[in-house]
Amino acid sequence: MIINVGLSDMKNKIIIAAVSVLFAGCANLKYPNWQYVRIENSLPNLNCVYKIQESCNEEANECFDWHKKRATTFGANTVVITDKSNQSQYSAGMWGVRGGENMNTLAEYYYCNGAKNINPVN
């Protein structure tokens, strides 16, 4: 009986691992090559074509990945952060203090040519 419990736990761990890999893969399917989008503080060169400007208000540091994923939907490979600020929001309630840090970013998306751009190997 002890062996069956061990196998059952192992099956659960395998199922959880498979589901985790599946969800991680969904972001790559919806936003192909988002990992290769560059984050810059200024326009890297003049061989860039402007696409669009967007803002993000998420928990700290989640905006960078959000901008990279959104950039792929507009055919961009470079995100230029034009404005960034952090806000702390906390509130006291019956169950204690709640809240955290939010990051507000304004970014422009570009398609850039040049040696610094990483092209994924297909």
Image (cartoon, rainbow, N blue to C red):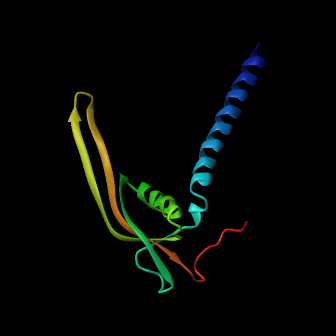
Residue drawn at point x = 47 percent, y = 81 percent: 44
Looking at the picture, how far across and down is residue 38, in whole percent?
52, 70
Q: How many labels does the image show?
A: 0
Give the quadrant of the N terminus.
Answer: top right
Between 74 and 105, the one nearer to me in the picture: 74
Choose top left, top right, bottom left or bottom right for residue 35. bottom right
Q: Tell me the residue at 58%/80% (across/down).
A: 116
Residue 66, above or below 47? above
In depth, the one of 77 and 81 nearer the eye is: 77
Establish if 4 lies above or below 19.
Answer: above
- Image coords of residue 114 (percent x, y): 58, 83
Is residue 96 or residue 57 the one in the foreground? 57
* Identity of the residue furthest to the bottom in this view: 46
- x and y percentages locating residue 109 in the rendered image: 44, 70
Please state if 11 lies on the left or on the right of 98 as rendered: right
Residue at 22% in and 32% down: 93
Which quadrant is the C terminus positioned in? bottom right
